[in-house]
């Protein structure tokens, strides 16, 4: 049986070094693609492959259109019978393609992937993401209900049959859209456990926090939340899980993870309060209350307060002005945060903050999530509820 033509497709946006690294890695694969297509999604300067890399064809967007559009366009531009999509920040095992290809000969299988592990380094954010975030199918084999967008292969005929990503209106979670679309068409999604992939992009604190919320914020904004119900939602959906992770963080010996937890729940609470004020008729009490709670929690922790304020400002949140509040609707949330203990907050102030600043000075990879836009289509609310 003749070998099908294989197209490797990837996308880049201001991360040329990661894209070049992926192209260089293909020279070590046991089975190489016959075509490589790169979508340059509005990079400045425009992407140009480095010297000594395999031949590629570049499809360029004049401006950044987002990963959903970039993936749809690059896969649709490829000419192979087998389409392989890999994010430019992944590095597959050399046998990845050889292992996945036979599975696509089965007509009932629509999409094939392997396990994905976050392996970006030993800095705090990378270790946190590996512990609690970006790992997929590490213990799975065979049919699954979801294939992450990091690295997968599909037959061209299947891609065209479902229309690719043409109906996906969000600029994230395109992998959920494609997985659901294929399953509705009756195709299996398959994991080959030996076809492992490492994700190596090193994220800044702000990029990581923005990324986590970008993935899931739309689900919380799909319908109006009454103003007096918002603190309870933040408590049940974010503070209780934080409390459940706390013993594991202690066991890992990584108290600096608590800073990321505190910054993330603050980002979530402040964004939901701001969205409620803009779209659901809420007042500004929620935002003022959260900042008041943070000030009280971090009393006397000058460095911790400064870093947290700066990170939240980069995420779009500025402390409001106004008279002191008569009550604290987020009291239950701050009871959980205070339960971390004064020793943890003191350690973050004296040792955690300097560690974060040193890691920041060492640099990180570009990530579009650092400037992510939370105003996605359809998220305009429908006014306040009774």
Image (cartoon, rainbow, N blue to C red):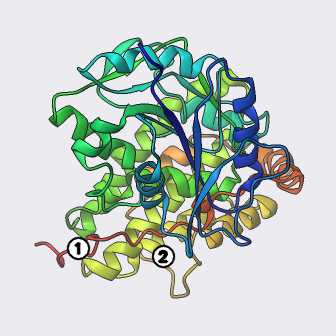
Vertical placement of residue 126 versus 190, above or below: below
Residue 380 against residue 259 in the figure, above or below:
below
For residue 33, side relative to residue 17 (left or right): left
Residue named by callout 2: 288
Callout 2: few (<14), some (14-19), or many (20+) C-alpha neighbours within 10 Å? many
Q: Callout 1: helix, strand or loop?
A: loop
Q: Which residue is mark 1?
A: 381
Q: Are marks 1 and 2 in contact (CB under 8 Å)?
A: no
x, y percent for residue 379: 29, 70
Q: In the image, is residue 385 above or below residue 104? A: below
Query: Observer-nearest residue: 201 or 305?
Result: 201
Question: Residue pushed farthest bottom?
Answer: 322
Whether residue 96 appears in this view of the structure is: yes
Q: Residue at x 69, y 48 (%)?
A: 19
Give the percent coordinates (x, y) of residue 306: 75, 67
Task: Report the residue at 55% width, 75% height from top.
Answer: 63
Chain-order first, disc 1 or disc 2 = 2
In this image, 311 relative to 136: left or right?
right
In terms of depth relative to the viewer, which is nearer, 357 or 169? 169
Specify few, some or many for label 1: CA neighbours under 10 Å numbering under 14, 14-19, or 20 or more. Answer: some
Of 37 and 359, the residue lying toward us: 37
Quadrant the C terminus occupies? bottom left
Which of 186 and 329 lies nearest the eye of the viewer? Answer: 186
Helix, strand or loop at label 2? It is helix
């Amino acid at each position: 049986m003749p070998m099908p033509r294989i197209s490797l497709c990837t996308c880049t946006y201001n991360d040329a070094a990661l894209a070049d690294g992926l192209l260089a890695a293909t020279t070590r694969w046991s089975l190489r693609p016959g075509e490589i297509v790169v979508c340059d999604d509005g990079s400045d300067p425009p992407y140009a492959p480095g010297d000594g890399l395999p031949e590629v064809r570049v499809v360029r967007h004049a401006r950044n259109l987002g990963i959903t559009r970039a993936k749809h366009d690059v896969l649709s531009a490829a000419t192979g019978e087998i389409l392989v999509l890999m994010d430019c920040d992944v590095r597959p095992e050399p046998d990845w393609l050889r292992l996945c290809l036979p599975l696509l000969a089965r007509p009932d299988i629509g999409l094939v992937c392997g396990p994905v592990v976050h392996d970006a380094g030993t800095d705090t954010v990378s270790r946190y993401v590996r512990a609690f975030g970006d790992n997929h199918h590490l213990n799975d084999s065979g049919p699954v209900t979801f294939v992450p967008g990091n690295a997968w292969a599909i037959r061209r005929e299947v891609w065209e049959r479902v229309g690719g990503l043409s109906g996906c209106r969000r600029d994230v979670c395109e992998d959920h859209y494609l997985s659901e679309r294929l399953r509705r068409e009756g195709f299996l999604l398959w994991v080959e456990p030996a076809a492992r992939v490492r994700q190596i992009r090193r994220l800044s604190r702000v990029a990581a926090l923005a990324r986590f919320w970008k993935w899931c914020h739309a689900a919380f904004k799909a319908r109006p939340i009454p103003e007096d119900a918002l603190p309870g939602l933040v408590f049940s959906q974010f503070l209780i899980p934080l409390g459940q992770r706390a013993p594991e963080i202690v066991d890992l010996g990584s108290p600096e993870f608590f800073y990321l937890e505190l910054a993330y729940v603050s980002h979530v609470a402040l964004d939901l309060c701001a969205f409620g004020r803009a779209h659901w008729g809420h007042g500004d009490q929620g935002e003022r209350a959260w900042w008041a709670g943070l000030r009280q929690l971090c009393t006397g922790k000058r460095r911790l307060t400064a870093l947290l304020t700066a990170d939240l400002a980069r995420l779009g949140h500025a402390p409001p002005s106004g008279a002191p509040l008569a009550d604290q609707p987020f009291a239950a949330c701050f009871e959980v945060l205070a339960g971390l203990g004064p020793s943890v907050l003191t350690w973050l102030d004296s040792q955690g903050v300097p560690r974060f600043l040193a890691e920041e000075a060492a640099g990180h990879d570009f990530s579009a999530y650092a400037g992510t836009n939370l105003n996605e289509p359809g998220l305009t609310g429908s006014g306040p509820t009774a």
